Image: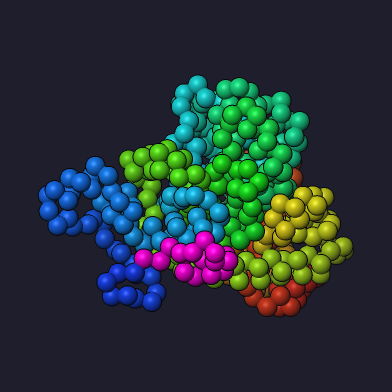
Amino acid sequence: MSDQWNKRTTLVHGGTRRSQYNEVSEAIFLTQGFVYDTAEDAEARFIEAGPDEFIYARYGNPTVAMFEERIAALEGAEDAFATASGMAAVNAALTSMLKAGDHVVAAQALFGSCLYILEEILPRFGVEVTLVDGTDLAQWKAALRPDTKAVFFESTSNPTLEVIDIKSVTDLAHAVGATVIIDNVFATPVFSRAIELGADVVVYSATKHIDGQGRALGGVVLGTREFIRKTVEPYMKHTGGAMSPFSAWIMLKGLETIDLRVRAQAASALALTDAVQGHEKLEQVIFPGHSSHPQFDLVKAQTGKGGTVMSLDVKGGQEAAFRFLNALQIAVISNNLGDAKSIATHPATTTHQRLPDDQKVALGITPGLVRFSVGLEDPDDLIADVMQALAQV
Ligand SMILES: *Cc1c(COP(=O)(O)O)cnc(C)c1O
């Protein structure tokens, strides 16, 4: 792999490890273990494994290593550790570095399972967690303390697509010595500049845009070599959240096309936002990449593009939203995102169903809100589909 390559070249060739057969497409090493030539070799490898020496698939595997190298190159991170799912990555990033008595500050608008780790699991082990409105810098400033060890947030929140100012929050966090961990799924690895803006650790659910075709679960933690190898790796090695070689192969091949896919999906999301803007059946249309978004200037500076997910607030509440969802003929009703297939979700009754009503209101999850993950279909067909579904509301 060359440092001179541009991203699209790196996404096709980065991290490739060829076997003695010199295969063109990357091999899937479906093996749990590796044979040592001698007992002395086994001993030496357990003392210190070289970069192309593997011991056990829970620790690492050649196909998994190819994925880790390629995604690290895309993100501009020194190193990466692949995990069984996005949640395994979030859990590893936080739990591997925290201990009883530590303090964490996190944004309140989070994916449900991230909130569970912060509100239920970490406090059980003596970690104190303060939740803030992530878009309000004054709240971050007030919550950060000298004993704050980590700051955690989703750079674009789900499903209301509020954007957090990475540089400003990171500067505040670093002033108290806290490690900044960003769940960057909605920004996507294609548009991410998180590390350049100061983030210490970036986490992705690879299930989303990295696979991009809804086939497998996966996740990845990215950061400095020191953090990944000295903090995350020992934790992952011994707790078992490793990515399977087969899933790593899917994710690795997903990276070959991610730039083309995500750029096309982001362009379609913008076209769809333009088409439905001001529609009489809609209360509101939210897309971070559109000039109507209240944080459009921040989005332009931070990621350039608005990602692949938009939200539509249908007038008439849940009944109207359901009518819209049921009338869609191309977009499917499901809860993944970043997929080649457009996916519509009703957060209030599915992904965010568990939240009490007052919390839904506080997060902007109205009964009429529909999250729309824009896929790879022809944008004209998608616009026509959404328009005919709105007409039936
Ligand atoms: C999907 C998602 C996760 C969890 O990822 P899984 O692969 O489903 O475990 C975490 N954070 C965000 C923002 C997500 O969208």
Magenta-tinted stretch: 1-17
Can you see residue 23?
yes
Image location (x, y in percent) of residue 173: 64, 32
Q: Nearer the viewer, residue 166 or 217?
A: 166
Q: Is residue 4 magenta?
A: yes
Q: Nearer the viewer, residue 326 or 164?
A: 164
Q: Nearer the viewer, residue 212 or 113?
A: 212
Image-based side of 366 in relation to 16, left or right: right
Image location (x, y in percent) of residue 63: 36, 62
Q: How many marks?
A: 0
Note whether 322 is above or below 233 in the view shown.
below
**Extreme residue toward the left, this view:** 39
Image location (x, y in percent) of residue 272: 76, 68
- Residue, x 47% and y 23% (percent of image)? 100
Note whether 100 is above or below 320 in the view shown.
above
- Residue, x 53% and y 51% (percent of image)? 77
Image-based side of 375 in relation to 222, left or right: right
Q: Quadrant of the C terminus?
A: bottom right
- Residue, x 66% and y 46% (percent of image)? 197
Q: Is residue 218 magenta?
A: no
Can you see residue 337?
no
Which of the colour schemes (rainbow, by chain, secondary structure, one colour) is used? rainbow
Quadrant in the rendering for residue 300 = bottom right
Image-based side of 343 in relation to 92, left or right: right
- Residue, x 56% and y 35% (percent of image)? 179
Image location (x, y in percent) of residue 364: 74, 45
